[in-house]
Image (cartoon, coloured by chain):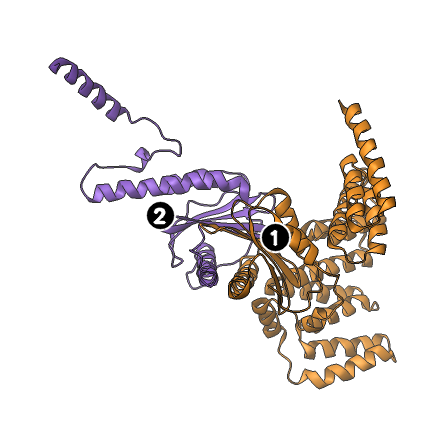
Chain colours: A purple, B orange
Amino acid sequence: MIKALRPLTELPGVQLVMFVSEDGVPIAVPGQGGPHALDPIEDDGRGLGREDAIAAVATGWLREIQQGVAQASWHEPQRIVLRGARGTLVMQRARGAVLLLLLSRGLAHEDVRLPMDATAARLDRNRGKETRDQAGAHPSTLAETPGPIPSVDESLRTKRSLDVGSNRDSS
Amino acid sequence: MKMVRKILARGRLKNARQRLAQDPSPRTYADLAQEFAQLGFSREVRRVCEEGLGLFPGNAQLTRLGDRARRLEREERMKELKRELGEAPRPALWSEMSEMLLDSGRYARAEEVAKEWLSATGEDDARLMVGRIACQAFFSDRGREQGLRAISTLEKAIPEMSEDPRPRRLLLDVYSRIGAWGEARRVVSELLQLEPGQPDLEARFRQLDGRADRAPTVQQALVLVESSGRLADEGEENRRASSGSVKPLLNELARAEDVEAALYLRGATTLVQGLKGATADRFARAIRQVLSSGRTTGRKLGLGQIYQVRLEGDFGTLGIAPGDLDAGALWTKSMLRGEREEGLMSLAGLNADIGGVES
């Protein structure tokens, strides 16, 4: 999962990338991108780190948004942006959890839309694979995780050409 | 090609001038300002907008265009100042630069320039500017940390400028605005020692004396401001003069094809276009909740003053542009971009007069 999130940390202007459960527990934090221009929340001395605090605050807001939009009979939003004078918080739902990014002042939320979509899609596919693994289908590793652009599976191509060959033989 | 475009633009400019002469209205003033803007004449844009606002005070579109022209002019001047400061810095340039950065809300950069000025000259004006910037950053963000920082910056400046009342006046402003009346009273009594017999200070002292007993401590007052997002004197601010009607701009936004609803709120009053009855009420309540929780989250995360909240889902896109005392919101079926996004952003900070609730 960290591997799937890593490309986001390499984007210039991205200060923090986290994958957080809906109840505010960080699932994966692949480290920060750039230096911290934002210094929102410090360690509280009770073992709760800065990331934990950010995750808790952000998902708390997410719940408040859900309650808010429910009044207008809307479903929960998939992408949420909070732009401030010193930075931007972007959250996107992925795999039943939340992909969370903190951007520095100069970076627009639209600049990370595509990479976030790609990462969310990758995380969704990972989940699909993991579910199949649990069901005992194929063993899988993160290295096999497909990228955002679909590609042809070589093993399937070989199998298909063999099938075609055997069909020809039988005819 | 450039030449042809210029000739065509001149023709359009002439037409816009003639239309304005025949029928002076906010629309024709805005058209002429737009033509100047396309030619890059920001000073002319500002002049036309000021003229138009003289005839049609508070017009939202002209205010928006004028603000944009002023911003452009300021950016141009800042570029010049940056170059001059690089070549031969002097106090007047540092002062102008930090003032402009402060006006445009770029507090971190303003502080850098002011500190550079202070370390180069050690002038009291530079020290005061550092304090002003810290105060303004706090008034804008309303975070506890910024508040403590502003207070400590001013407390440090006071012994350095012991005979100068200005840093104490700033500190008095901070304490009064957060509602720390006890501390405010202490600062007024210090000011009275510096400026004995000042009637405004004496009246202030008497006023604060009555409030000081029930006043929260500085820490309590700052926590209160951070959690509510409101300064103690915000009630008075809310009553300040409004900038006119927002209805034309809201109507224009709501008429667009893919716009479901447009909303403007100020204080307890909301104006919704595009939705009616209970649906409009529910929409307004949803916006209020998202906005107030967004402001708190922004402060907690140290994002500074919130400029935009955006939600995307199967309902479409909801954009909210919060101002200091008001906010605008736009619900669209598709993505919120270009002109519509610009229109939404211009709703924030209008402080328009909206009378009662309307749907």
| Of B257 and B95, the residue lying toward us | B257
Q: Amino acid at mark 1?
A: Ala
Name which residue lies at 62% across and 73% down.
B221
Residue at image mark 2: A95
Q: CA distance from mark 2 to mark 1?
A: 35 Å
- Image check: A58 left or right of B17? left
Q: Position of residue B359 (x, y in %)?
A: 59, 63
Label 1 is found on which chain of the structure? Answer: B
Give the image quarter of residue B167: bottom right
Q: Which mark is on residue B254?
A: 1
Q: Position of residue A71 (x, y in %)?
A: 47, 63
| Other-residue count near label 1 (Cα within 10 Å), few / some / many at <14 / 14–19 / ≥20 | many
- Image check: B322 left or right of B353? left
Q: Secondary structure at mark 2?
A: loop
Q: Amino acid at mark 2?
A: Arg
Name the image quarter holding the C terminus of chain A: top left
Give the image quarter of residue B124: bottom right
Q: Position of residue A129 (x, y in %)?
A: 27, 40
| Of A87 and B324, the residue lying toward us | B324
Query: Looking at the picture, does residue B30 appear above or below residue B171?
Result: above
Name which residue lies at 82% across and 81% down.
B202
| Of B242 and B184, the residue lying toward us | B242
Name which residue lies at 66% across and 73% down.
B232
Query: Looking at the picture, does residue B279 appear above or below residue A119?
Result: below
